[in-house]
């Protein structure tokens, strides 16, 4: 039974890790491109900033889904 518990814990850690790495890379790329866009066309900075915040919120939502999956997996141990 301990092997199953270990695999579940490993799956939970993997879910959180992949979600965090994916969101971190995505947020870095999106932020960098937004900064480049604002530097090239400062007159549309408000629109770019708004769209960036919406995109970052969606990326964070995916990270929270990874955390939710991890909690569900850890709940299976008990």
Image (cartoon, grey):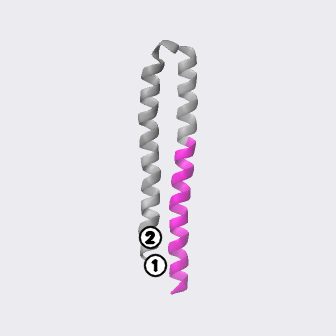
Checking the image for residue 73, the label placed there is: 2
Q: What residue occupies the far bottom of the structure in this picture?
A: 1
Residue 57 within the magenta-colored segment of the rendering: no
Name the residue located 55 percent from the left edge and 28 percent from the top edge. Answer: 33
Kindly report the distance in space between the C-alpha atoms of the residues bearing marks 2 and 1: 7 Å
Taking the spot 51% from the left edge, 81% from the top edge, the residue there is 4
In this view, 14 is above or below 2: above
For numbered disc 2, what is the local secondary structure?
A: helix
Q: Quadrant where the C terminus lies? A: bottom left
What percent of the width, then of the height, locates residue 39? Answer: 58, 17
User: Residue 71 appears in which quarter of the rendering?
Assistant: bottom left
Q: State how many labels appear.
A: 2
Q: What SS does tag 1 mark?
A: loop
* Left or right: 46 as drawn, with respect to 32: left
- Disc number at residue 77? 1
Q: Residue at x 46, y 16 (%)?
A: 44
Place of residue 23 in the rendered image (x, y in percent of width and height, measured from the top left):
52, 46
| Disc 2 to disc 1: CB gap under 8 Å | yes
Q: Position of residue 43 (x, y in %)?
A: 48, 12
Q: Which mark is residue 57?
A: none
The magenta stretch is: 1-25
């Amino acid at each position: 039974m301990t092997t199953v518990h270990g695999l579940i814990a490993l799956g939970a850690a993997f879910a959180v890790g992949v979600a965090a790495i994916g969101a971190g890379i995505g947020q870095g790329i999106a932020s960098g491109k937004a900064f480049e866009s604002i530097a090239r066309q400062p007159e549309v900075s408000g629109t770019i900033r708004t769209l960036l915040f919406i995109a970052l919120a969606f990326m964070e939502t995916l990270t929270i889904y990874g955390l939710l999956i991890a909690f569900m997996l850890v709940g299976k141990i008990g």
